[in-house]
Amino acid sequence: MSFFIADAAAQGGQATGGFGFDFLLMIAVFFLIMYFLIIRPQTKRAKEHKALVESLSKGDEVVTAGGLLGRVTDLDENFIRVELTEGVQVTVQRQAVTAVMPKGTLKGA
């Protein structure tokens, strides 16, 4: 059990230092936990979103970060034009697209 609690040293015994192997091992374990629970999933989501934004094309039915559902009518390097209903178009940033919906979603909405 000396991994969590340092052994008490007797008066004539050997003194233990503050930074030992146990401490370094604990820091390494915490870093691995942080990597697998926070950093890795976040970078995976960022890569998936980047691929989604790059794969947009005319006619795709998309949902924006603001909750707007529409069809892509025009593409630019940084912006897209989304038709919400017939005659109503808005311009949003490509990064604001959160999901591409299956074809025909707008007919049901």
Image: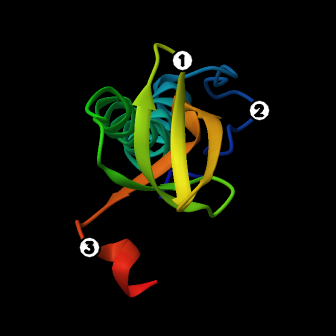
Q: Which amino acid, by three-letter code, is at mark 1? A: Asn
Are dots 2 and 1 in contact, CB under 8 Å? no
Q: Earlier in the sequence, mark 1 or mark 3?
A: 1
From the top left corner, tell me how far across and down residue 53 is, in percent: 38, 33
Quickly name the residue at label 3: 104
Residue at the far front: name it.
87
**Could you tell me the amino acid type at mark 3?**
Gly
Q: Secondary structure at mark 3?
A: loop
**Residue closest to the far bottom:** 108
Vertical placement of residue 89 versus 47, above or below? below
Residue 101 falls in which quadrant of the image? Answer: bottom left
The residue beneath circle 1 is 78
Crowd band around label 3 with a 10 angstrom C-alpha radius: few (<14), some (14–19), many (20+): few
Mark 2 and mark 3 in contact (Cβ < 8 Å)?
no
Give above or below for 42 relative to 61. Answer: above
Q: Residue at x 43, y 31 (%)?
A: 74
The residue positioned 63% from the left and 20% from the top of the image is: 19
In space, the residues marked 3 and 2 are separated at their CA atoms by 80 Å
Mark 2: few/some/many CA within 10 Å (<14, 14-19, 20+):
few
Q: Which element type, helix, strand or loop, lies under badge 1?
A: loop
Placement of 76 over or under 73, stated as above or below: above
Instruction: Write down the residue under mark 2.
Output: 11
Task: Identify the residue at horizontal 77%, vertical 32% (top origin).
Answer: 11
